Image: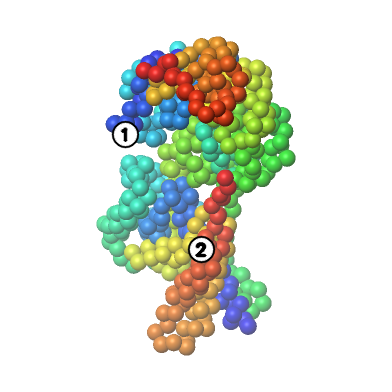
């Protein structure tokens, strides 16, 4: 039983980070109706940024986070201005192709700047140890959980209570109406990319602290992608639930199923199997917004 | 207040939709723009509000002047800032947002945040029907409620000129009357000029001061609303009345269609 609970807890922690990254997906999807293939690469860049600020520059953790967020903001603005603004009004497929190109560029950039090597800053992030009975929560994931929860809450408040948040939700519904209301859609787009970059980079710092950084860290984007599909492509609440679900499933599957099979790759496959089964019965995902149709 | 001088509009560099349209909206007036499908009414509105530019349309000739400023080169966001709001055809609700959020979106650029709250109440005063629905998801409202919300949404920007595109579309006659009564009240109380595009000529001329009739991208007839109401051609083609002003009889074996006198 303890073993099971232990798996649940670390799964939850992992799931929160997935959620964080998935929210980046959801925001871009809501605004531009396109999947951002490069979301995982924001995470990878975030991991490397964490390494640079924490290890190379020896900055304290809070300063590193702030610096990384600052870089993320600049990155988001640049990406929107240089690659996505020219694509406004183009077919969604063209936008997706552009994000593929973006992912390749980011990968090249990471190789150029950090040499594409395996970097680790294990033990640099502050550790909080928490023991509940026999359960112990791995210290580095706990800080990840806390940061993720804070960021997710901030984002939800942002959408619920601020003018810019409302403008973003409105833009997702009808661009033309929003423009007739005097809202600049380009600003809204820029904001959405900035947020996507920030959540990606923060997720990257957390994951980098747990398992180290190298180029394949970008593959976590695919997991977040599964989270988004499972939760419903345009629902932040769905991303939270689905993120935790996938994190827990992955860990529990790793704990119980991997020893049974030689090779032990099942943990990575199992969440996707669940995703496929759910999508068969609920094509909009668990919490996806159904198109409202009335005449 | 608004002068549209002989504008031509071309879509996608090839399809000419307007071939020289001129009209004028005076301070605090209600102006009706009538015409059949495809006459260019909506395009005229979009040329004024700048939304044309979001649809690859372009004003290629003529000028649009609002409050002494030439606005035909502006984008929709800049034009909205000068005090023009368009209420688009077909309601266009932001379906997943609540009624109140829909209203708030149009107050986005207002600096006087305190008065915005008061304005929301004012909108509900004009449209008491949607007051109880303020937290409902707007996509599930009835057609009439949505139309009311969308007009109210336009008010939230506090425009000097509101462009209303077919507020009667798809609504029951009684509801059309109700909405037109409210439009008249808004015009009188807010001193807001209204440019009204309608197929329902009877309803539109009922509240308008002046009217224009469009056909094939041109204005073919204009005059005071009372004059237009009495015009035989307008009666025949837009109100379904025959020459004598009585309901047209379709029982007679054959009747000869009047020819439009203005056809060019």
> Front-most of B182 and A139?
B182
Residue at point 41% right, 62% down? A221
| Disc nearest the viewer among 1 and 2 | 1
Q: Position of residue B143 (x, y in %)?
A: 62, 40
Asked whether the viewer can see residue A199, the reply is no
Q: Position of residue A267 (x, y in %)?
A: 46, 77
* Residue at the front extreme, as displayed: B253
Q: Position of residue A91 (x, y in %)?
A: 35, 47
Q: Are marks 1 and 2 in contact (CB under 8 Å)?
A: no
Q: Secondary structure at mark 1?
A: loop
Chain of the residue on which disc 2 is drawn: A
Q: Position of residue B14 (x, y in %)?
A: 29, 31
Residue at point 50% right, 67% down? A279
Q: Which residue is mark 2?
A: A283
Side of B97 where B70 appears, left or right: left
Q: Secondary structure at mark 2?
A: loop
Side of B194 where A68 appears, left or right: left
Asked if both marks, 1 and 2, belong to the same chain, the answer given is no
Against A295, is A226 above or below?
below
The image quadrant that residue B122 belongs to is top right
Image quadrant where one finds the C terminus of chain B: top left
Label 2 CA crowd tier, 10 Å (few <14, some 14–19, many 20+): some
Asked whether the viewer can see residue B175, the reply is yes
Chain of the residue on which disc 1 is drawn: B
Q: Which residue is mark 1?
A: B12
Label 1 CA crowd tier, 10 Å (few <14, some 14–19, many 20+): few
The colour scheme is rainbow
Residue at point 46% right, 30% down? B37
């Amino acid at each position: 039983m303890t073993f099971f609970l232990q798996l649940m807890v670390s799964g939850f922690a992992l799931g929160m980070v997935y959620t964080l990254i998935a929210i980046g997906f959801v925001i871009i999807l809501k605004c531009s109706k396109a999947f951002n293939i490069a979301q995982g690469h924001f995470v990878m860049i975030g991991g490397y940024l964490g390494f640079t600020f924490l290890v190379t520059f020896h900055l304290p953790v809070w300063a590193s986070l702030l610096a990384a967020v600052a870089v993320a903001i600049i990155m988001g603005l640049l990406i929107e201005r240089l690659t996505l603004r020219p694509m406004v009004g183009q077919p969604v497929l063209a936008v997706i192709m552009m994000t593929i190109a973006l992912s390749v560029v980011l990968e090249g950039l990471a190789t150029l700047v950090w040499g594409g090597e395996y970097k680790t800053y294990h033990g640099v992030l502050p550790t909080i140890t928490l023991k509940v009975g026999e359960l112990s929560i791995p210290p580095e994931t706990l800080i990840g959980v806390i940061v993720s929860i804070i960021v997710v809450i901030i984002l939800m408040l942002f959408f619920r209570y601020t003018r810019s948040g409302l403008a973003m939700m409105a833009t997702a519904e009808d661009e033309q109406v929003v423009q007739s209301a005097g809202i600049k859609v380009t600003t809204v787009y820029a904001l959405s990319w900035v947020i996507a970059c920030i959540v990606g980079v923060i997720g990257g710092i957390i994951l980098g602290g747990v398992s180290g950084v190298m180029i394949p860290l970008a593959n976590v984007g695919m997991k977040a992608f599964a989270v988004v599909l499972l939760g419903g492509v345009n629902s932040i609440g769905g991303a939270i639930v689905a993120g935790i679900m996938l994190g827990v499933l992955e860990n529990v599957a790793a704990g119980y199923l991997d020893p049974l099979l030689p090779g032990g790759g099942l943990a990575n496959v199992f969440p996707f199997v669940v995703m496929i089964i759910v999508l068969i019965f609920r094509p909009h995902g668990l919490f996806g917004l159904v198109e409202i149709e009335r005449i | 207040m608004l002068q549209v001088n002989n504008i031509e509009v071309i879509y996608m560099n090839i399809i000419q939709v307007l071939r020289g349209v001129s009209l004028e909206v005076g301070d605090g007036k209600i102006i009706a723009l009538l015409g059949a499908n495809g006459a260019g009414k909506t395009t005229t509105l979009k040329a004024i509000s700048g939304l044309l530019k979001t649809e690859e349309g372009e004003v290629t000739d003529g000028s649009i002047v609002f409050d002494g400023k030439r606005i035909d080169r502006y984008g929709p966001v800049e034009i909205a800032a000068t005090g023009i709001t368009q209420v688009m055809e077909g309601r266009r609700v932001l379906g997943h947002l609540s009624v109140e959020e829909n209203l708030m979106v149009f107050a986005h650029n207002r600096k006087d945040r305190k008065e915005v709250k008061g304005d929301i109440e004012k909108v509900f005063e004009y449209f008491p029907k949607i007051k109880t629905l303020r937290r409902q998801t707007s996509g599930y409202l009835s057609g009439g409620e949505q139309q009311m919300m969308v007009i109210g949404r336009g008010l939230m920007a506090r425009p000097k000129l509101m462009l209303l595109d077919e507020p009667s579309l798809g609504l029951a006659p009684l509801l059309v009357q109700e909405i037109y009564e409210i439009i008249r009240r808004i015009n009188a109380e807010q001193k807001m000029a209204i440019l009204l595009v309608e197929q329902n000529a009877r309803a539109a001329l009922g509240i308008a001061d002046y009217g224009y009739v469009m056909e094939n991208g041109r204005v073919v007839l204009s005059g005071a609303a009372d004059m237009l109401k009495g015009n035989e051609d307008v009666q025949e083609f837009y109100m379904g009345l025959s020459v004598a002003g009585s309901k047209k009889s379709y029982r007679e074996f054959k009747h000869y269609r009047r020819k439009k006198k203005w056809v060019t």
